[in-house]
Amino acid sequence: MKHYDFPLHFRVLYDRAVVLYAKGQRDAKTYFDKAQMAWLAANGITAQHVYDYAEDENAGGEPGFGHAVLIESARHNYFMNVQHGRSSSIVLEESRMPLKTDTAHGIEWLPRIIPKAKAKLKGELPASLMYCCGGDRRFFKANDILPSEFLGVVWRNADNDSATVDWVVARSKSGR
């Protein structure tokens, strides 16, 4: 695998998924051939991740390829350098997630997005959750945060969620 070509290969698979979704194909498992699935797996990505981007692209264009490639590059970096190319067997239990209306320092969605970002970095999101979904995008826009940047903050802060909260509070204030 050539790491340098990651954005190019991801673009090909992203565009393929967008076209298939537009044609009405709704099963992520049927989007890619064996070699493409192997490439996704070797980079810590699932077909569902790409499907989610394609679905949202067809429903209004967001988050778009630019955000998708940055997010998946962050995931790729974590997968290669922290997980050493090995997938996690853990899957985040959606029922244990904070509520969408929960707040931290008055910022709605913040308690929910932190474990979601950790799960995205580790490849532990269930198929039912998308990192950078509509709710996430509202949070990112309201607080002037780049979705891939947030993954970096969560990665650096590891289990220190209060440091992540403090960073978001500071960012949110600076943008108002």
Image (spheres, rainbow, N blue to C red):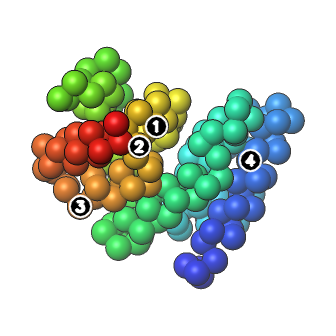
The quarter in which the C terminus is drawn is top left
Residue 4: quadrant of the picture: bottom right
Q: Earlier in the sequence, mark 3 or mark 1?
A: 1
Q: Amino acid at mark 2?
A: Asp
Pinpoint residue 163: horizontal percent, then vertical percent.
15, 49
Of residue 89 and residue 13, the one placed in the foreground of this image is 13
Look at the image and tell me whether residue 119 can be seen: no
Secondary structure of the residue carrying numbered label 1: helix
The residue that label 1 is drawn on is 141
Q: Earlier in the sequence, mark 3 or mark 4?
A: 4
Look at the image and tell me whether residue 73 can be seen: yes
Pinpoint residue 157: horizontal percent, then vertical percent.
19, 56
Residue drawn 46% across the image and 30% down it: 138
Q: Earlier in the sequence, mark 2 or mark 3?
A: 2
Residue drawn 71% across the image and 57% down it: 13
The residue that label 4 is drawn on is 17
The residue that label 2 is drawn on is 144
The residue that label 3 is drawn on is 156
Pinpoint residue 67: horizontal percent, then vertical percent.
56, 52
Real-space CA distance between mark 4 and mark 1, rounded to the nearest whole angstrom: 25 Å
Q: Residues within 10 Å of mark 4 (few under 14, many from 20)?
A: many
Q: Earlier in the sequence, mark 4 or mark 2?
A: 4
Residue 136: quadrant of the picture: top left
Pinpoint residue 31: horizontal percent, then vertical percent.
74, 47
